[in-house]
Image: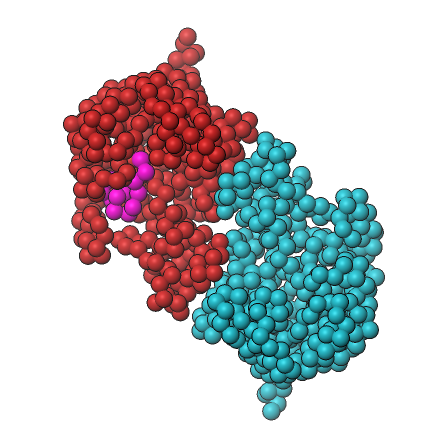
Chain colours: A cyan, B red
Amino acid sequence: MINKLVYNHAMINQFSFDLLAVDGKARAAVFNTPHGSIKTPVFAPVGTQATVKGLTPEQLISLNSQMLLANTYHLYLRPGDELIADLGGLHNFMNWQKPILTDSGGFQVFSLGEINKITDESVTFQSHIDGSYHTFTPEKSISIQENLGADIIMCFDECPNPYDRAYNEAAMNRTHQWASRCKDAKTRHDQALFGIVQGGIFTDLRIQSAKHISGLDFPGNAIGGLSVGEKKFEMLEILDIVPDYLPADKPRYLMGVGTPLDIVQGVARGIDIFDCVNPTRLARHKTAITRTGRLNITNKIYEKDPAPLIIDCSCYACQNYSRAYIRHLVRANELLGPILLSIHNLHVLIELSETIREEILKGSFHSFLKDFLTKSEENGVPK
Amino acid sequence: MINKLVYNHAMINQFSFDLLAVDGKARAAVFNTPHGSIKTPVFAPVGTQATVKGLTPEQLISLNSQMLLANTYHLYLRPGDELIADLGGLHNFMNWQKPILTDSGGFQVFSLGEINKITDESVTFQSHIDGSYHTFTPEKSISIQENLGADIIMCFDECPNPYDRAYNEAAMNRTHQWASRCKDAKTRHDQALFGIVQGGIFTDLRIQSAKHISGLDFPGNAIGGLSVGEKKFEMLEILDIVPDYLPADKPRYLMGVGTPLDIVQGVARGIDIFDCVNPTRLARHKTAITRTGRLNITNKIYEKDPAPLIIDCSCYACQNYSRAYIRHLVRANELLGPILLSIHNLHVLIELSETIREEILKGSFHSFLKDFLTKSEENGVPK
């Protein structure tokens, strides 16, 4: 019995969260995991199918990627979580030895799968790949995530249309029940299970959810169900309130949200962890991002342009290639086009997170925020 | 006048060919170019549109790629050779500072373009991209290749169906006239222009062509019009004879030919330089190559296979990933699938070339060849 307690204590320490500085609501911290420490605020690139599209792990490391996200729904369907477990877990399978976070599959079941039936017990859905039927329960989601073996795993949750109050209240209550079941189902001690706050755009539901989830004492907490169709100002209203109801001594993760402006505004409201498919998806749609804008590389004005994507950018793509070359690659459907754009876009978000962290540590985040919002507004970036 | 001679002499020395060892007809040499020395025998990866599909130059360098090939026809059409010249030439445009070879566009004009009219003066064709009309002359091909700025450039040639004797004789004569016109049209001293032997499967035409081209005293010579539909034994019959009629003190390049067996058999017949799209094309078709066989990674037997693509292979893909993972990537249409397969396939050919070179330097190429042919036959590789 003592041995078990000592063991659990050691495991809990693997996930310690050390708050280094607070500037307003913004926080700089270190979150320790079995695969290394994460300096927050942090942006996590998304490797949906156990690969960040087009990039090797070495390229991601040279971008200073500290952690990746992978999707439980996709990996369960293909190649299967048991196969990944047999091959040593996700870290070995995909050759990534830094921290990984897996979502619960909840969001994808509701957005990608064809929903067949939802009860308090389970969700039955059809695969987007072959139409086959599958049933997820909170226990099943945890079992899959234990097979995948990420460092941070998520509670199974329901993510409805954010505007339907009655549905959001029901889904929130279900998400709360499922959170307890996930906690009970968990058996591995080398994974940190995060709770998820739901409640749509309704601040009272969000507060109720944040209080409930906080009460379950997870080693970290997430805000789900944002950036799913609501207006930016509605998202910010929720972010103005919810983090205050989540414990300050644990990491806070804003799921699936991660434009440069989102990150700055999220950090200003107390968020530590972000992920988003945008940088790599935009890259595949021929778009380079800047901190406060975008550039469509197929634009004719770049045809003969010897300048890098973004002047003064220190990323590999900008240090070595011209707009003219990347435009050529994209127009010629060459794989290197989206690869270079992905490298650039991820660099922008990761470097932005690093800058934000430095500003917090220096105590100058507030003036950085003011400048950033001014520049974004000047560039017409939607607030 | 003296200055000019000295200058030309220095330039000619940039392309010196130092024969280090001969083993039977096989040769180990160093070919010096303005962008560095090439140790031969060498396999050149193909970067048709100024990029080897899916790979960065750094990945190619870590594969020990010594030189790349790029295609004049494609780059003339898109993004345009003048644009590339304005951006500092192909080396700067694509961020590759080692030697580059461009073909003349001849082969692609005849194989990809819709031919409108061929005369002794010129070829008019329609672009495979947009159907627009273009005219190539030998002079135009040289002008484009001077704009691209590769280290090794090729004479404009006609590459017909290898079985039509009358056509091959006419095309050969035209190719000979065009070779002289290319030589006269050339103005840059930092590029080596290679002649091309044609003549289909007809040994007398091939000998006639090799003698004629040798007489034009190019700094290197190529054999074109092989691997274009003829049988393997027919190709070998040509390769048994032609190199003997090409100067021994200059590099010999076998155009567009490069399976492992082709390389071994080509070297055994006196070839120094090879290029082929096969390794990267097969990679995009889900296939890994070995020295003496192939492996279709989508095969169900690899579903849970923790082994690398090829046991004992030292490439990045085999050192870090399982067959199961690469199969998953390929089935999930993930870009990293063909990228890893391309890395592996190029490694096999480049490492094979390095092994062959060592065997020649040791004087043991003949026994290596014998072993190689035995293993290929055992594995049912077509001779």
Quadrant location of residue A324?
top right
The range drawn in magenta is: B255-266
Task: Tell me if residue B142 can be seen.
Answer: no
Q: Residue B206 location, x and y as percent?
A: 20, 28
Residue at point 23% right, 34% down?
A: B162
Q: Is residue B265 highlighted in magenta? A: yes
Q: Is residue A299 left or right of residue B300?
A: right
Q: As displayed, is residue A354 above or below residue B328?
A: above
Q: Residue A368 location, x and y as percent?
A: 80, 51
Q: Is residue B360 left or right of residue A118?
A: left
Residue at point 21% right, 55% down?
A: B380
- Work out which residue is located at the far bottom of the displayed protein and give it: A1
Q: As displayed, is residue A102 above or below residue A305?
A: below
Q: Is residue B67 left or right of residue A305?
A: left
Task: Tell me if residue B70 can be seen.
Answer: yes
Quadrant location of residue A157?
bottom right
Q: Quadrant of the N terminus of chain A?
A: bottom right
Choose between A322 and A329: the one closer to the eye. A329
